[in-house]
Amino acid sequence: MEFNPRKSRELMASINIVPFVDVVLVLLIIFMVTAPMMYRGIDVDLPQSSTNTIKSEERIVMTVGKNREIYLDKEKVSLDKLEYILSVKKKQNPNITLYLRADKDVPYGIIVQVMDAIKKVGIDKLGMITEPAKEQL
């Protein structure tokens, strides 16, 4: 084999993009760090008011567990006392909102009894808490 100096001097025709990728990644990191700092609201000095025009909404979460246990927020309640406790809360705040969470294995009859107690008290704002369905492939 002979050494050919002409072959060793041929130029490579491809571009080295590693430095370009490094620069782009550094710019991306800088953008990600500074973007949240760039968002700025309008500075406003709000006037003060002695009356509150926006009323906060009282929300109660009722949970019915697998063993038919009923909880109002985190307090365990029997089905017999549920209607009384809800009526007291309704008298305290007529615009109360109740969210119902129930285990999927709880019998339908129990849920109907709980919802019946809610209706008897006169709570109109009732929401059902569920988990979003997982997408099937």
Image: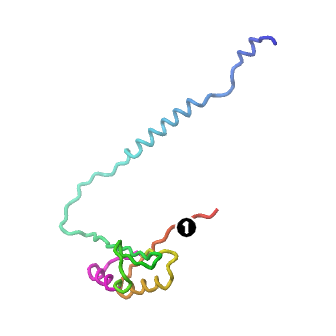
Residue 114 percent coordinates (x, y): 42, 83
Residue 5 percent coordinates (x, y): 74, 11
What residue is shown with label 1?
A: 133
Residue 28 percent coordinates (x, y): 49, 39
Up-down relation of residue 54 to residue 123 (above or below): above
Q: What residue type is disc 1 on? A: Ala
Residue 26 left/right relative to 5? left
Residue 19 left/right relative to 99? right
Q: Name which quarter of the figure residue 38 lies in.
A: top left
Q: Is residue 2 magenta?
A: no
Q: Residue furthest front?
A: 67
Q: Which residues are magenta?
A: 83-99
Please report the residue visible at 48 percent of the width from the left and 71 percent of the height from the top.
Answer: 130
Please report the residue visible at 57 percent of the width from the left and 64 percent of the height from the top.
Answer: 134
Residue 117 percent coordinates (x, y): 39, 86
Characterize the local packing of mark 1: few (<14), some (14-19) or many (20 or more) Cα atoms within 10 angstroms. Answer: few
Colour mapping: rainbow
Front one among 10 and 89? 89
The quarter of the rendered structure image containing the N terminus is top right
Please report the residue visible at 49 percent of the width from the left and 85 percent of the height from the top.
Answer: 109
Q: Secondary structure at mark 1?
A: loop
The quarter of the rendered structure image containing the C terminus is bottom right
Q: Residue furthest left?
A: 50
